[in-house]
Amino acid sequence: MIALTFPLMLMLLIPVIVLEGLLCKKWLGLTNWEAMKSNAVSNLVSTLVGIPLAWAIMLGLQFGAMASVERSHFLVSNSPLATVVGLLLSSAWIPPAEGSNAWWIPAAILVLLVPFFFASYGIEYFTMTYMIGRPSGGPENLARPRIRTAVRNANLVTYGAMFVAASIWLIYLWATFIPPTIVDFRPTDFQLKVDKGFFYSIGDELKYSDELNPQAPSLFRGEVQYFQVSPDSSKLAVVANGRLLVVGPEKPSVREVAPVDSIYRDPKPMGQSFYRDQDFQWSEDSLYLYLIRDEYYGSRGSQLFSSKGELWKYAVQTGELHLVLKPFPADTYFFGQNGGIYFSVPTESGDLQLKYFDGSRVTDVGMPNTGSISPDQLSANSVESPFFSFSIVDYQRAVIAEKEVELVIDQQDGSEKLQIAKKPYLAFARGGGRKEAFYCADISSSVFLPGDRYFLFNASCKNYEGQLLVDTETGNYRKLPQKTRVYPTMNTNTNQHYRISSGGVLPN
């Protein structure tokens, strides 16, 4: 969301023009008409040219800082200095400012008032000099030095008033803010072990173990953007540092599949071939990883259904890449028996048509835009056993709902309770200002560890900020190291609650 400074400046334009006109009239000895006219024009030019230019420069600095995040751990750290620097660099474009982040709006306004002041002062000075300035020998009160001083002082008064108003707003939010907390926060340090190994990361170190052990050997270091756990849970396909990798506990622990890029890249490097950084899938036997090769071309949108697309597969044991199907104008696909591949492509009318590739030819499956297709309708020869690995978004939408994980408001005391299968575990006291209330638990990015006994979720509270792990059998919970992330397995073998449509496999 764009910081509210620019719209605020537009709303304040009329009173600013009036106030600066009165000041310039007094300091330059102008008539009412001369003062208002020259000041209105100069303010209009600074608002339409100067302020947008200053905002664009700040936005460019912000994008430059964002591009350097991967090269600098400082910009993404939790230190107070990093927070201040981040605010200074991101004031032109801030995320939704709600709850504990409501102070971002007045803070961003205070930051942007500085470049806006210099832009307004410079452009208004040159505009008023052009309109009412007099050369040497003319009236002394209209000489350029006098105009420069008058415009500077008038802007100091108006911007000073806005600075004071934004400061009062910021102080008010700070004074009336009540931080949310975890009620009766008593974490323990219980031992954790599950029946089989799983992938997790602490910070940017990827690990594999049957427990969340910070001392476990690191398999790979890097920020994981996208991932897919193999069906046998022994390998993890990850996108990190612009590469698609297969990581596992066995040597070699890291195998590079290919450099990857985003289909959402803007601007597009036309004609450049690349492998997509999303839409990769494991085969059911965990021996092959499928990925889409594409080429940037002029298209409306992200070229999701690309006429340049090709389906490739990577053999984990040999490290070889092989072309499977070309063209492959799809982003969603799943597997059938005997190596068959089902994929969804758009029709000329905009509907989706499910197709089947048996290794030699492509045929249509059912009618376009079909909402539900049973497995016995997929193949004419036998009942299929489709295989598909779900994304983390599918996991959180389906599994969290299936396990009945909820955040429920207690109508008596106003607290929010974490419930799993109707059983309450932790309670959270609400925070906020005088007009709004919010809580600090977040289950949108939560996961269960293998076996579904332990539940990991995020909290951003006054008395604790980070990840917590709940033992659903005992009710105990423990703190986890900062930035702990678990990579769950979810596919059509582990979760039978799904349906097949013309658009592919969807979780119920």
Image: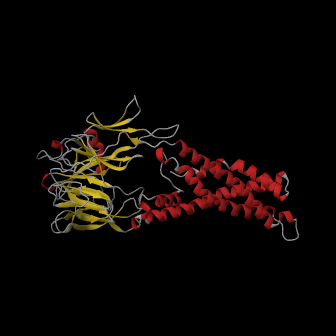
271 relative to 140 in the view: left or right: left
Q: Is residue 369 visible?
A: no
| Foreground residue among 348 and 287 | 287
| Foreground residue among 361 and 203 | 203
Compared with residue 278, is residue 394 higher up or lower down, i.e. above or below? above
* Location of residue 40 in the rendering, given as x and y in whole percent from the top left corner: 74, 53
* Location of residue 56 in the rendering, given as x and y in whole percent from the top left corner: 56, 61
Q: Which residue lies furthest to the top in this view?
A: 412
At a point 43% along the width and 42% down the height, the residue shown is 180
325 relative to 135 in the view: left or right: left
At a point 88% along the width and 70% down the height, the residue shown is 137
Specify the quadrant of the image occupied by residue 125: bottom right
Q: Is residue 247 visible?
A: yes
| Foreground residue among 294 and 248 | 248
Instruction: Work out which quarter of the rendered image holds the C terminus and state it.
Output: top left
* Location of residue 146 in the rendering, given as x and y in whole percent from the top left corner: 80, 64
Compared with residue 299, is residue 420 higher up or lower down, i.e. above or below? above
At a point 51% along the width and 61% down the height, the residue shown is 89
Specify the quadrant of the image occupied by residue 259: bottom left
Q: Residue furthest left?
A: 382
* Location of residue 161 in the rendering, given as x and y in whole percent from the top left corner: 68, 51
Specify the quadrant of the image occupied by residue 37: bottom right
Count the numbered circles shown: 0
Q: Residue furthest bottom?
A: 136
At a point 34% along the width and 42% down the height, the residue shown is 185
| Foreground residue among 305 and 139 | 139
Which colouring convention does the figure follow?
A: secondary structure
